[in-house]
Structures are given as structure tokens and as C-alpha cells.
Image (spheres, helix red, strand yellow):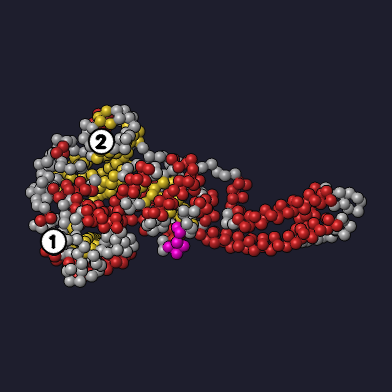
């Protein structure tokens, strides 16, 4: 025990540490931040309670001390070594709790840097003004571009490097050979072989075969021209809209939208009753001239009876007894059915009015649209980007009181307030005509259930429609791709965590993106004269990373050759997995922060 706070692991006392990072929050994002910090050799203390068992196992595996208490308790922060901390990262799932913890840190140690997770832009701006040494990071805004790229199946990631337009593009190899022979100066950052094995930032001497996939980085102008490169760009071009429905078909669908099964059965029952009665009249009714009814008279008299009009032009007083009994039964049944019909029609009209209010009637005529399931912080960020790109979007959100529904309506996006795991909900969203689906709720098991329902609803179109699913566990993501053939499984934590860590350690992040299941980060660092990178050639970089540009006194050098040597003062623009870029950042220092003898 330290004061009234319990240390969850038997480690040395963090109160005496210097230069470490305190992470507040034992949820998915917090655990991923801890993993990245430990991969860079940084000491970490994590504060938080009520964590899931899987997250606690990861923390224990990393041998990270955990303060099993609230980070909004001053004693918890002092027990975690706030006095000597390099930075405090507040990444609890609740925005207000993150705000409270950040404000407490500033009150206790005003010079300590604070990185705060916030999903509300207004709150984020308020925090920025209230915490001079703080930085506000919105995971949803950071992850949204990656999810949008997956929804549109672009396989193209754009970014600005020193004022120039760079891009990462996935291609399929069309001729076997070495990467250098096939792609020249374009830099490969990932090779995905047909047997699902991968090579991150491979040597240009690496051999690839027809059918392998390669992610290349370079100037966008060069990547968009593949005339002399034996590769086929991946990504689905804009799909043409589905053929328009015939006018009568579209009218019938719109008129019937919102009608429940009871109304349809009632109308059907009246039709069947009227038809049977008309047939009986044709064969049994005989007028005063001893003539039988023709079809038109029989239908007319049947409708007249069902409508309870009774003009007096036909009567049963001279008809056989059985026909009068049939007429009595028909009138009784008609009274009951008409009462039910009036009630159901009233309900139907009210339902259509509500549907029109929410814009749902427009969904029935949509084709080639994107269905977004879940309207949380990530969902609304994805919707905003898609609408800005001119995409038609339909939102399915289970909670009719969701705070973001107003924002969706302001964007003229129809919202269906129903459960997306139900087939009827997917039909309401016109799933058979959708071009892509994004399942983005905050519950990964609900996302899995919804994804399976979407796959069943798409039927034969499943292989051709991008279905993007949000998960938190990276192992689950890998299993979903391998076993259930989901090809766009993404994690907000995996994409956004590097920004928190980079902000804590001083790395300037330019972009994060995902290729296959591998997360990459593009960042800038300045080579220190006393650091471990000065004098190192591109070929001898100590970890998986690719220097894509160098700014030095001679100007900007694009895709430097393997013999190029880093010099003190160079600004190196580097792309690689987060763990490797953070290790590269630490290698650039003269001493190890873990020893507590330097600051970034």
C-alpha cells in the first residue's frame, strides 16, 4: 500500500522514478499506448480500475506497474511518480473523466506535459485553452480517414511531406522478380505474399511472385503512373449506380414503405373475401329476368357490399337462402376487417409521417450508397467525411436518443433507429443496393454479430462489397480476416495510439494508416549530432523503417538511395510500424530516457 492506494504489481516504487510516462486508463487505447511506450524502452506506470481481464493480462505481460485506483485521486498520481514524470497520457473511455484527470495533473504539477483524449471538439478547445502544456487528441478524427479509405476500398493513402504530395499505394504483382527490378526507385513498405506471410519494409533485393501484393510509397505523381511497372493497382473504382427501378415498381415500393404485416394481411383478406363473393354471385345470383350476373356486375356488387354502400340496384330478397346466408357472413366479416383496416391505415399514415420526418423514405430509392452502423464519435466522423466526398450515406443507430443524430440530420443523412443485427433493419437500409458497409459501434461483439448479419444479407454480393468492421482486439481482427474472410477489420486504438505516444515523446506525426492488418506511421525527426543516427546509412538503419525524404542544406531529397548517410541536422521523414519509429526516435537520443538522465 502507498497511502490509501494499492500497487497491483510487485515492482520498485514509481515515486522515485524520473523520465517515465503515466498512462491513465486501462481500456483498449490505454493498453495500446502502454505497449508502444514499452517497445520504445520507456518506463510506464498505468493508473485505472475496472479493466477487462484481457487488458490486465497484457499489462502484466509487459511487467508494467498498475495503480489500482482512480487517476482523479491526487494520491494515485503521486504514487505513480507524478513529481518526476515526463508526461501524463489521459486516455480513459469517458471524456469527462479524462478532463478531470488532466485538470488535476495541471493543478498538482503545472509543468508536466499532459496528452488528453477528447471526442468532443468544443470540450477539446476548452481544454487546450485551460492547459498550457497540454495537447488534445481526438481518436475518432485520427482514425476516420483510415476507415473511409477502407469503406471506399481505395488502397491509396495520401500525405504531405515537406510540401510535396506523397502517397502509399497497394498494387498486385504481375511479373515475378526482385522489388528493385520491378519498381525501381519506388519504396516498398509491405509485401503480402499469397500464403499470407508478410515482410515489413523489406530489402529491395526481396523477390516477389505473380499475385503477391506490395504497398509502395513515393511521390503521388509517380505512383499514379504504372505504365512501365508490372503491377496492377488495387482498389475498386467508383461503382456505377444500380439500374433504376421501373416507375410502377418504385411507386409500389414507396407506397408500401412503413406498412406492417398486419395491414398487408388485412388488405389481402379483404381482397380474397371480395373475390370469393364475386365468384359466388356470378354462379348463384339470378335477377328478375332470370339472368345470371356477368363478371363486371359480380365485382361491382361485391365491392358495393364490402364498402357497405348499398345503392339498392341489387338485392337478396328474391335470392336463394344460402346466398343470403353468404351475404350475411360477408357483411359481418367486412365490418370486422374494415374496423381493423381503419386502425391499421391510421397507424400506417402516422408511421409514414415519422419516416418522412427522419428521411427514411429516401432510403428506398437509394443505390450505390454507404450504410454506416453506429453513430458514435467515430461513426459521425466517418459520415461527415463521406458526405463531404459526395457519397450517399444511410445511418443505422440502435439508440433513438443518440446525441449525434441531430448532426446526421443536419447533413441530410437518413437515420434508421433500429437494431442492425435484425434482417428487417438491413432491408430498411436497402442493403441489397449498398456499395459499402461500415460497422462502427463501440461494442466489438455487437459489431461481429452485425457483420455476420450483413454478410448474410448481401448474399452473393458479399465478396464484392467492402464491409469495414471496427474491433479493439488485434488478435480478434486477425482471426476475423483469416477465418470469416472479413477483409477490412480496423482498430481505432491501433491507428490513434501512435499519435498519443509520439506526442508524449516529441515525434512529429504526419499521418497514420493501415495496410492489410499492419499499422504504419509517417513522422519527422531531426537527426541529433550526439545521437545514434548521425552517420548511419539508409541501408544500416537499426529497425524496420523507410526514410522517404531528407531535408538538408542542399535541399529536399526524395527517396534517398541506400548509400545515403544521415547527417546531424537532417530532417528525416520516415515511414514504418509505430514500434519501429519510436525505437528509431529513441536511437536518435544520446541517452536512454528510461535511465532518467535526459528529457526529449
Q: Furthest-right residue in view?
A: 289
Q: Position of residue 586 (x, y in %)?
A: 15, 50
Give the image quarter of residue 82.
bottom left
Please name the residue shown 48% across and 58% down the image. Answer: 418
Decide if residue 600 is in sight here.
yes
Tell whether position 399 is magenta: yes
**Up-down: is 294 above or below 539?**
below
Decide if residue 184 is in sight here.
no
Image quadrant where one finds the N terminus: bottom left
Magenta-colored span: 397-402
Q: Nearer the viewer, residue 454 or 232?
A: 454
How many angstroms separate mark 1 from mark 2 (CA)?
A: 48 Å
Residue that carries the numbered disc 1 in the rendered image = 12
Position of residue 388 in the picture relative to residue 129 (left or right): right
Magenta-drawn stretch, dominant element (helix, strand or loop): loop
Q: Nearer the viewer, residue 54 or 560?
A: 54
Please name the residue shown 91% across and 53% down the image. Answer: 288
Single out the mark in the foreground, 1 or 2. 1
Q: Furthest-front residue in view?
A: 10
Q: Position of residue 125 (x, y in %)?
A: 29, 64
Tell whether position 323 is magenta: no
**Up-down: is 4 above or below 158?**
below
Where disc 1 sits, the SS reads: loop
Please name the residue shown 80% across and 58% down the image. Answer: 327
Whichever of callouts 1 and 2 sits on the residue coming sooner in the sequence is 1
Please name the residue shown 27% across and 60% down the image. Answer: 26
Q: Position of residue 204 (x, y in %)?
A: 22, 33
Q: Nearer the viewer, residue 496 or 413?
A: 496
Residue that carries the numbered disc 2 in the rendered image = 186
Position of residue 457 in the picture relative to residue 223 (left or right): right
Amino acid at each position: 500500500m502507498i497511502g490509501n492506494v494499492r500497487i497491483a504489481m510487485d515492482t520498485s516504487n514509481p515515486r522515485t522514478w524520473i523520465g517515465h510516462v503515466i498512462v491513465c486508463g486501462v481500456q483498449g487505447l490505454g493498453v495500446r499506448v502502454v505497449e508502444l511506450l514499452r517497445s520504445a524502452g520507456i518506463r510506464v506506470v498505468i493508473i485505472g480500475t475496472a479493466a477487462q481481464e484481457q487488458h490486465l493480462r497484457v499489462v502484466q505481460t509487459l511487467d508494467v506497474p498498475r495503480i489500482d485506483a482512480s487517476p482523479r485521486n491526487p494520491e494515485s498520481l503521486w504514487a505513480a511518480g507524478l513529481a518526476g514524470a515526463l508526461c501524463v497520457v489521459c486516455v480513459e473511455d469517458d471524456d469527462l473523466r479524462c478532463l478531470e484527470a488532466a485538470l488535476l495533473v495541471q493543478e498538482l504539477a503545472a509543468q508536466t506535459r499532459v496528452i488528453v483524449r477528447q471526442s468532443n471538439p468544443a470540450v477539446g478547445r476548452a481544454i487546450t485553452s485551460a492547459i498550457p502544456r497540454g495537447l488534445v487528441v481526438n481518436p475518432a478524427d485520427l482514425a476516420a480517414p483510415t476507415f473511409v479509405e477502407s469503406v471506399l476500398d481505395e488502397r491509396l493513402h495520401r500525405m504531405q511531406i515537406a510540401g510535396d504530395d506523397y502517397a502509399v499505394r497497394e498494387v498486385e504483382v504481375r511479373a515475378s522478380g526482385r522489388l528493385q527490378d520491378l519498381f525501381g526507385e519506388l519504396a516498398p513498405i509491405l509485401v503480402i505474399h499469397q500464403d499470407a506471410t508478410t515482410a515489413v519494409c523489406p530489402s529491395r533485393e526481396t523477390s516477389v511472385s505473380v499475385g503477391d501484393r506490395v504497398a509502395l510509397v513515393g511521390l503521388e505523381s509517380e505512383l499514379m503512373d504504372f505504365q512501365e511497372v508490372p503491377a496492377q493497382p488495387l482498389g475498386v473504382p467508383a461503382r456505377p449506380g444500380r439500374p433504376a427501378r421501373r416507375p410502377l415498381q418504385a411507386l409500389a415500393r414507396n407506397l408500401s414503405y412503413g406498412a406492417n404485416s398486419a395491414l398487408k394481411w388485412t388488405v389481402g383478406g379483404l381482397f380474397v373475401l371480395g373475390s370469393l363473393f364475386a365468384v359466388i354471385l356470378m354462379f348463384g345470383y339470378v335477377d328478375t329476368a332470370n339472368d345470371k350476373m356477368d363478371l363486371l356486375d359480380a365485382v361491382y356488387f361485391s365491392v358495393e357490399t364490402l364498402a357497405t354502400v348499398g345503392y339498392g340496384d341489387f338485392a337478396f330478397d328474391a335470392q336463394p337462402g344460402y346466398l343470403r346466408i353468404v351475404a350475411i357472413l360477408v357483411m359481418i366479416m367486412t365490418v370486422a376487417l374494415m374496423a381493423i383496416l381503419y386502425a391499421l391505415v391510421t397507424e400506417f399514415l402516422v408511421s409514414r409521417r415519422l419516416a418522412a420526418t427522419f428521411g427514411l423514405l429516401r432510403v428506398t430509392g437509394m443505390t450505390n450508397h454507404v450504410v454506416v452502423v453506429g453513430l458514435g464519435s467515430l461513426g459521425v466522423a466517418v459520415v461527415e467525411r463521406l458526405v463531404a466526398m459526395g457519397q450517399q450515406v444511410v445511418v443505422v443507430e440502435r439508440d433513438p436518443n443518440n446525441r449525434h443524430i441531430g448532426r446526421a440530420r443536419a447533413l441530410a443523412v437518413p437515420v434508421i433507429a433500429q437494431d442492425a443485427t435484425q434482417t428487417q433493419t438491413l432491408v430498411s437500409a436497402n442493403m441489397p443496393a449498398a456499395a459499402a458497409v461500415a460497422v462502427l459501434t463501440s461494442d466489438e461483439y455487437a459489431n461481429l454479430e452485425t457483420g455476420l448479419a450483413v454478410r448474410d444479407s448481401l448474399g452473393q454480393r458479399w465478396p464484392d462489397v467492402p464491409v469495414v468492421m471496427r474491433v479493439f482486439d488485434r488478435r480478434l481482427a486477425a482471426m476475423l480476416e483469416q477465418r470469416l474472410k472479413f477483409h477490412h477489420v480496423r482498430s481505432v486504438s491501433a491507428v490513434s495510439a501512435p499519435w498519443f505516444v509520439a506526442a508524449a515523446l516529441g515525434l512529429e506525426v504526419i499521418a497514420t494508416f493501415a495496410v492489410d492488418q499492419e499499422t504504419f506511421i509517417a513522422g519527422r525527426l531531426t537527426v541529433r549530432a550526439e545521437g545514434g543516427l548521425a552517420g548511419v546509412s539508409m541501408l544500416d538503419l537499426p529497425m524496420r523503417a523507410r526514410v522517404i525524404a531528407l531535408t538538408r542544406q542542399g535541399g529536399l531529397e526524395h527517396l534517398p538511395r541506400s548509400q545515403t548517410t544521415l547527417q546531424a541536422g537532417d530532417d528525416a521523414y520516415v515511414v514504418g510500424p509505430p514500434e519501429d519509429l519510436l525505437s528509431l526516435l529513441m536511437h536518435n537520443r544520446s541517452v536512454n530516457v528510461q535511465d532518467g538522465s535526459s528529457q526529449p
